[in-house]
Amino acid sequence: MSSFISHTTIDCTNAYELSEWWKPVLGYVDLDGDPNLPGHEECMIRDPETGHQVLFIEVPEPVRGKNWHFDVRPRERSRDDEVAWLQEYGATEVADHRGIYGPGSGWVTLADPEGNQFCVLRSPAELEAQQPHDG
C-alpha cells in the first residue's frame, strides 16, 4: 500500500500572480471550469499532457526554505489509517486540520524524519463517498 502525490503546493503571498507567472514557464493551464482570477487565495494549474497539478496557496508569512510541500492521497487506506501508518513509519504530526470544513473534511500535516512537511488528504474513495449521487 502506498500514497500518490495529489498535487504540489506552493505557499506564497499572491496566488494569482504566481500561478500566472508559472503557467507559461511550465506550459500549464487553469483547471477546466475553474479559472484562476485576481484575488483568489488558492490557484491551481495543471499540465495538459500529464495532468500534474500545482496549487499556489496564500499564507500569511511564507517561510523561506519551506515554501512547498507534497499533498498526498492514500491509494487504499483511509486518510486516518494512512496517518497512523505514517506515524508508525517515523513521521511526526505538525498540525491536525481534520474536520476544518465540517465532518469528513480536512487534512493532517506531518513531517518526515528530516522535518520536511507534507499533508495527508482524504483518499479518492472517501471523496467519492462524500459526493451526492443521483438515485
Image (spheres, rainbow, N blue to C red):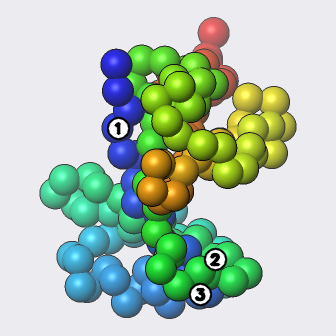
Q: Amino acid at mark 3?
A: Asn
Residue found 51% across the figure and 58% down from its top = 115
The local secondary structure at tag 3 comes to loop
Q: Amino acid at mark 2?
A: Glu
Q: What percent of the width, then of the height, locates residue 43?
A: 52, 71
**Residues at marks 1 and 2 touching, judged by CB atoms closer than 8 Å:** no
Residue found 19% across the figure and 53% down from its top = 50
Q: Which residue is mark 3?
A: 14
Q: Which residue is mark 2?
A: 58
Please give the label number shown on residue 114: none
Q: Is residue 31 visible?
A: no
Q: Would you identify the image quadrant in which residue 14 lies? A: bottom right
Q: Identify the mark nearer the N-term, 2 or 3.
A: 3
Q: What percent of the width, then of the height, locates residue 132?
A: 66, 24
Of residues 65 and 56, the one drawn nearer to the viewer in this rendering: 65
Residue found 64% across the figure and 77% down from its top = 58
Q: Which residue is mark 1?
A: 4
Q: Nearer the viewer, mark 3 or mark 1?
A: 1
Residue found 29% across the figure and 55% down from its top = 52
**Residues at marks 2 and 3 touching, judged by CB atoms closer than 8 Å:** yes
Taking the image as shown, residue 63 lies to the left or right of residue 55, namely right
Q: Identify the mark nearer the N-term, 3 or 1.
A: 1
Q: Would you identify the image quadrant in which residue 26 lies? A: bottom left
Q: Amino acid at mark 1?
A: Phe
Q: What percent of the width, then of the height, locates residue 123?
A: 51, 28
Of residues 23 and 58, the one drawn nearer to the viewer in this rendering: 58
Q: Is residue 95 above or below residue 10?
A: above
The local secondary structure at tag 1 comes to strand
